[in-house]
Amino acid sequence: MDGTLLGLGGKKPSEAVQDPNAYISACPTRQALDRIADKWTVLILGLLEGGPMRFNRLRREIEGISQKMLSQTLKSLERDGLVSRKVFATVPVTVEYSITPLGATLAQTLVPLRIWAETHIARMLEARTAYDRAEGDGPARLDAA
């Protein structure tokens, strides 16, 4: 393979992001934003910031994540260079996940986002309740899904 990617117009990844602009639909930085905006990414990187963890411990710590979703997210994070996977030759095989230096830079930016969410969720829920109450009393909206 010649190192080019079809989704990048035949360019090498390093060539495709010379002038990144996430507001352009073809910009590959949107892939990074998709990864960052994923709630499982935020939670997994937050846990791995504390040190390496095995799959089942991650699954126990992150309530509500399915085995399939955890596996898919870890594979995507590994592919993106944010997480590394180490296999130990034990019976049964032991697999440990760690955050990479690149992943650590992302995790550092996500911590304030998680803290913001934890700090302001009550106000968001109050606003949502008030909005829903007003929508129930008022005329039907044309932009409602």
Image (spheres, helix red, strand yellow):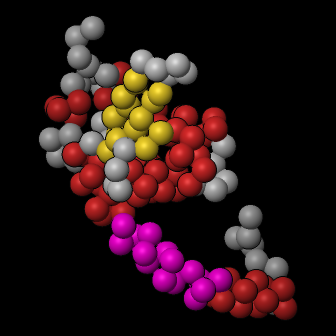
Q: Position of residue 10 (x, y in %)?
A: 28, 21
Residue found at x 67% / y 54%: 64
Is residue 71 toward the left or the right of residue 46 in the image?
A: right
Residue found at x 60% / y 86%: 122
- Of residues 15 and 51, the one nearer the viewer is 51
Q: Position of residue 34 (x, y in %)?
A: 44, 48
Q: Is residue 61 magenta?
A: no
Is residue 117 toward the left or the right of residue 24 in the image?
A: right
Residue found at x 44% / y 69%: 114
Is residue 13 toward the left or the right of residue 115 in the image?
A: left
* Number of numbered discs visible in the structure rendering: 0
Residue that protrudes farthest toward the front in the picture: 91
Q: Is residue 23 visible?
A: no
Q: Is residue 73 above or below residue 86?
A: below
Q: Quadrant of residue 124?
A: bottom right
Q: Which quadrant: the C terminus?
A: bottom right
Q: Which quadrant: the N terminus?
A: top left
Tell me the chief SS of the magenta region: helix
Q: Position of residue 24 (x, y in %)?
A: 34, 49
Q: Is residue 145 above or below residue 141?
A: above
Q: Quadrant of residue 127?
A: bottom right
Q: Position of residue 99 (x, y in %)?
A: 32, 45
Q: Is residue 123 magenta?
A: yes
- Of residues 79 and 24, the one nearer the viewer is 79
- Of residues 65 and 129, the one nearer the viewer is 65
Residue found at x 35% / y 21%: 6
Q: Which residues are magenta?
A: 111-125
Q: Is residue 9 visible?
A: yes
